[in-house]
Image (tube, rainbow, N blue to C red):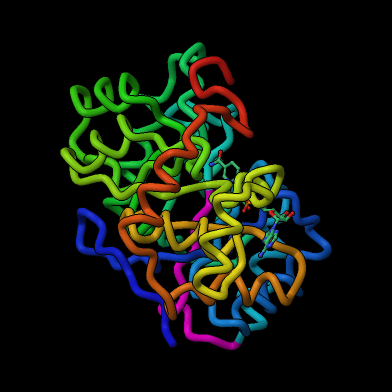
Amino acid sequence: QSVPTVTLNNGVAMPQIGFGVFQVPDAEAESIVATAIEAGYRSIDTATLYENEEGTGRGIASSGLAREELFVTTKLWNTDQGYDSALRAFDASLNKLGLDYVDLYLIHWPAPERGAYLDTWRAFERIHSEGRARAIGVSNFQPAHLERLFEASEVTPAVNQIELHPNLQQAPLRESHAKNGIATEAWSPLGQGKGLLDDPALAGIAAKHGVSPAQVALRWSIQLGNVVIPKSATPSRVRENLDVFGFELDEEDMSTIAGLHTGNRVGPDPDTLN
Ligand code: NAD
């Protein structure tokens, strides 16, 4: 069964599930990416920060799939923000990945104190117009950062990749995205596995459908229309996390999960990480 896609605001199709490689050592990235592709993932999410673009690129190459069958995302790190430095960082990422284009290039964090995300975005617009990134987007942008970007730029981000799971449901951002044609991509969709997956409400819904709490968390996000990028280094879980299209959460399940919002982040606060 192939993964459904969402259509981005420039017409590019993005698989609704991708495989994230945060905290995967470069030496292990090749085999875990190959395992994920073998399991059926067609979208891979890496970043310069993860220091595994080379291993990820080797995993992609070893899959033997045609390049156009894969959707590859990488991200610009904060210290590379700025027009010239972003262009250089992009070249370095392509080199490490061993690719001549990426499908999606993201500004990893707004890093507001640096005051450089608008200049960075101009470099992204150039990279996009050159066809070296099929789509460009942002990550961890708050509503205020998006507003500034809209005022100052030509191209609306295709994606905002944000922390999003049942404990952090991001209603205001999802509303802004819907209004402005931005796809919502959920990072740490399993809440990094800590605590969230032990929630008795998720366990109850999981038992009802004969699936795992992780599958319920992913399915909930997918039914909201989000793209999700779960990570696992365990092959059985890599497969389990993709197997979420054979059941459907009903209204009662969805409203039970809506009640799990606490507002607690597992990651940094985008307003203060610089
Ligand atoms: P996640 O929510 O995907 O959780 C991963 C952890 O959950 C695993 O390490 C494992 O402990 C557990 N897990 C995975 N599958 C499971 C299963 N089926 N059953 C039980 N436990 C399971 O967290 P993440 O890795 O932080 O996020 C996923 C991806 O999002 C990353 O790999 C990365 O690509 C991306 N990300 C982006 C940002 C950003 O700033 N843009 C930040 C963090 C992560």
* Residue at x-position 27% and y-position 51%: 129
* Residue at x-position 78% and y-position 58%: 26
Residue lying at the far top of the rendered structure? 113
Q: Position of residue 169 (x, y in %)?
A: 42, 38
Residue 149: name its quadrant.
top left
- Left or right: 205 in relation to 133: right
* Quarter occupied by the C terminus: top right
Residue lying at the far right of the rendered structure? 27
User: Is residue 100 a member of the stretch shown in magenta?
Assistant: no
* Residue at x-position 29% and y-position 64%: 6
Q: How many marks?
A: 0
Q: Is residue 95 visible?
A: no
Question: In this view of the protein, which residue sits in the foreground, 47 or 37?
Answer: 37
Question: In this view of the protein, which residue sits in the foreground, 255 or 139?
Answer: 255
Segment tinted magenta in the rendering: 64-74
* Residue at x-position 64% and y-position 58%: 231
Q: Position of residue 22 (x, y in %)?
A: 67, 50
Residue 124: name its quadrant.
top left
Question: In this view of the protein, which residue sits in the foreground, 62 or 165?
Answer: 165
Residue 2 vertical position relative to residue 260 in the rendered view, above or below: below
Q: Position of residue 30 (x, y in %)?
A: 74, 71
* Quarter occupied by the N terminus: bottom left
Q: Position of residue 57 (x, y in %)?
A: 64, 67
Q: Is residue 261 visible?
A: yes
Residue 80 vertical position relative to residue 252 in the rendered view, above or below: above
User: Is residue 65 a member of the stretch shown in magenta?
Assistant: yes
